[in-house]
Image (spheres, grey):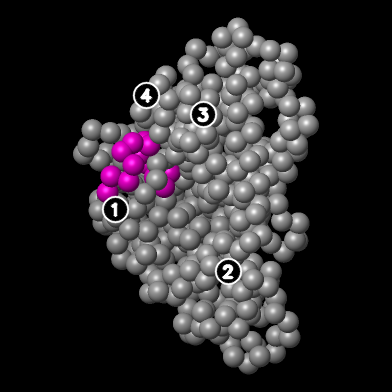
Amino acid sequence: MKWEKLLSLKKHGDRIERKRKDENETRIGFEVDYDRIIFSSAFRSLQDKTQVIPLSKTDFVHTRLTHSLEVSVVGRSLGRLVGQQILQKYPHLDQDLGYTVNDFGAIVAAASLAHDIGNPPFGHSGEKAIGDFFSRGKGKIYRDELTDKEWQDLIDFEGNANGFSVLTKSRPGIEGGVRISYATLGAFMKYPKESLPKKPTRDICDKKYGFFQSDKEAFVAVADDLGLLRKQRDELAFRRHPLSYLVEAADDICYTIIDFEDGINLGLIPEEHALEFLIKIVQKSINAQKYAQLSCTEDRVSYLRALAIGSLIQDAVRIFVEHEERILAGDFPYALMDKCAYVAQMKDVISLSVNKVYQSKGVIEKEVVGYQVIHTLLDHFCTAYNNSFYGEETHYDSLMLKLLPEKYLSENDSLYERLMSICHFISMLTDGKALELYRTIKVTA
């Protein structure tokens, strides 16, 4: 892969080439990507979507929105630090083409900002709830009418693939969705493969999938324009865009350290564990005197969190730069943080968070509620939409469809497209709105 192509400013529908040297320095295309994402309704919905604690009203617990903003900040730092090294190694990118350190930061920041934009309500359990509805719930009735790959998209519903759809899906008058640059879309695409085969290798980019069958054409257009390398197998799969490693690292760093911080602030993890588990990460940068002067738990944990994130950023940059040629060749099958100097400490922190936070009684109880909500919404909306299509619509079905925004309704002959449209609708609901709709349905049903 070549950086010249990987840093493409092209957007959906462009008829002329966008050159970096021609960009207005007061409003560079990669920075416009960030703005477009910020102003999108899909991004706004993240303010009421679960990060760790579903339906939490505690003001210091992170939502998907605050998590995404924090990941974008870490991503910007990673991008700029890596970009500095890349421009030194390939000076023509700056001298001949006009790329700057800030371009790398802007691309990674925008992709990081959008990394959870396709996640359904109720966190990762929301993805599982959608999948379970089709694989084990009432949605099983649709299996025989779908191809294997279409069915896999539904039973293994994936927030990353849904995010690509949110960012690129066209509808009348809005071509190319949010319409962001191909470089940012490439950095966003952590798993550049279709849903089958599932986990065909241990390569990190095969861990999940990155696009639905309905978005295959758009995905291929982006991948081919960027010059992503195709994998040599029958199914459609590519090697990663190099900057997607940085987006992944930013997310890994934030959820490891910040979810741990949330657990301490909630009282689910004892404060003394903060220093005990983070000391090896922060030992080179901690000011013991300053730490001793901090008088409250929140301040002490915040200080350790900031130092830990700084150390992990520096190490992620080191790994990327050391392996940059392998990454460009599509021969680096690992997440950056799997190779960092602090991998053992990160695993310990994640393990503690899983045991004390993710599997706490409060979280589990609220995830159970989320399952009930999502299964009920899918059942009623899918039934109403399909009954309407086949001319078997009841009065109740017509009422249900009036609750469905117009953009999700179309005269579509494809059952797969109709089911995906309902999944898209539900995935864009906030936790609170999904719960409100559920209560409305349960009262009227």
Q: Is residue 228 left or right of residue 439?
A: left
Q: Nearer the viewer, mark 4 or mark 3?
A: 3
Chain part drawn in magenta: 189-201
Element carrying mark 2: helix
Element class at badge 3: helix
Q: Is residue 336 above or below residue 271?
A: above
Say if 173 sits above or below 362 in the image.
above
Residue under pointer 1: 202
SS for tag 1?
Answer: loop
Which of the pair 41/382 is nearer the observer?
382
- Secondary structure beneath dot 4 equals loop
Q: Is residue 409 left or right of residue 402?
A: left
Q: Residues within 10 Å of mark 1 (few under 14, many from 20)?
A: few
Mark 1 → mark 2, Cα distance in angstroms: 29 Å
Tell me the residue that label 4 is attached to. Answer: 147
The mark nearer the N terminus, 4 or 1, is 4
Q: Which residue is mark 3?
A: 139
Residue 371 lies in quadrant:
top right
- Amino acid identity at mark 4: Thr
Dot 2, crowdedness within 10 Å: few (<14), some or many (≥20)? Answer: some
| Distance from Cα at disc 3 to Cα at disc 2 | 34 Å
Residue 182: in magenta span? no
Q: Which of these two is toward me, 362 or 88?
A: 362
Q: Which residue is mark 2?
A: 356
Residue plotted at (52% across, 79% down): 278
